[in-house]
Amino acid sequence: ELEVTQAALTITADDKSKVYGEENPGLTFTYTGLVNGDTEVSDKPAISTTATASSKVGTYPVTLTGGSDDNYAIKLVAGELEVTQAALTITADDKSKVYGEENPALTFTYTGLVNGDTEVSKEPAISTTATASSIVGSYPVTLNGGSDDNYAIKLVAGELEVTPAALTITADDKSKVYGEKTPALTFSYTGLVNGDTEVSDKPAISTTATANSNVGTYPVTLTGGSDDNYAIKLVAGELEVTQAALTITVDDKSKVYGEVNPALTFTYTGLVNGDKEVSTEPAISTTATASSDVGTYPVTLTGGSDDNYAITLVAGDLEVTQAALTITADDKSKVYGEANPELTFTYTGLVNGDTGVSDKPAINTTATASSGVGSYPV
């Protein structure tokens, strides 16, 4: 007899690798010892591994079980499935904040987590050089450390952008009296932070009003002004020119009883800017006439206006004084022994159609009917 014995055949599980989180690759094996053109055994061995898609990084056995062929003495050799780290990028999230504000919460984002993982076992530290007082600009947000056996971690920095703070510069409202110099023009800040008291480049402030400007409201405008740390809004103000105080006073007058009234006049106190008079002069009048008795009569002002003045009218007086009047005893004569003639007198200076005084003077003489020849006073 010729006995044909089994040939030695080794079936070796092929080594495999996969990335953490991936499905297992197809498991295969390799024959060593096939002869006679055989390509496989009649009853193939089962091949398996304990590794799954969620298996952590490490080495897992790939085992063969069973398998037979009458022509072969089969030896099964296990292989390995190596689970390698998955690529994971941890990126610092870009952030922004307004100049003067506290830093926002710094965060990062994972790209590449698998198997339902939500974070790595040891998270990286995150920090920035920016502070609440950092000026406008971009500051790095950096990651340090961080690890996980299942991931090959790449850290990517982000940026914290500090943007200009909103700042309003408002021209302060001002007022001045007509004729006065323009007051110092000022402005106020709303929105300064970090202990700032002004901007690096202040705006120019101006108004169209001058000392000669009429009563009214004039704009106070701001132009220019800048600061890298602020987004500046300029707000105009107003300069109000108010009326100047002006007193118009009647000039006191006098006249003699019987005379025509003198010209009535008034005097300004408070005119400015070279003004000589108001735009609408007041009317001036008195109750006194040429025939008014001796006494004091009011001289009054009515009306009068000027946009640039707050006018106060002050009355005056017209004083009528006594007219000069001479009453002269008329010279008389008589013959010695006759009775005295009627004694009379004559007015010189009567006016206004007066024919006599209200209380006539008494007239007499020392001469009598028996007075000797001579001159006697009347």
Image: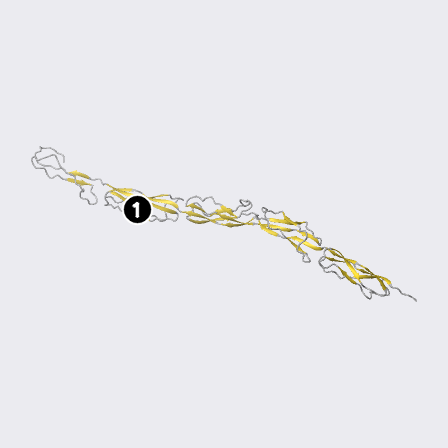
Which residue is at the far left? 337
Q: Amino acid at mark 1?
A: Thr
Give whichever of 323, 87 is nearer the camera. 87
Give whichever of 16, 116 is nearer the camera. 116
Quadrant of the image occupied by residue 109: bottom right
- Could you tell me which quadrant the N terminus lies in? bottom right
Q: Report whether 347 appears left or right of 68.
A: left
Q: Position of residue 178 (x, y in %)?
A: 41, 46
Determine whether 45 is above or below 243 in the image: below
The 10 Å Cα crowd at callout 1, few under 14, some 14 to 19, many 20 or more, is: many
Q: Report whether 179 appears left or right of 33.
A: left
Residue to which mark 1 is pinned: 300
Q: Secondary structure at mark 1?
A: strand
- Could you tell me which quadrant the C terminus lies in? top left
Give whichever of 56, 86 is nearer the camera. 56
Q: Position of residue 264 (x, y in %)?
A: 30, 45
Q: Report whether 263 appears left or right of 309.
A: left
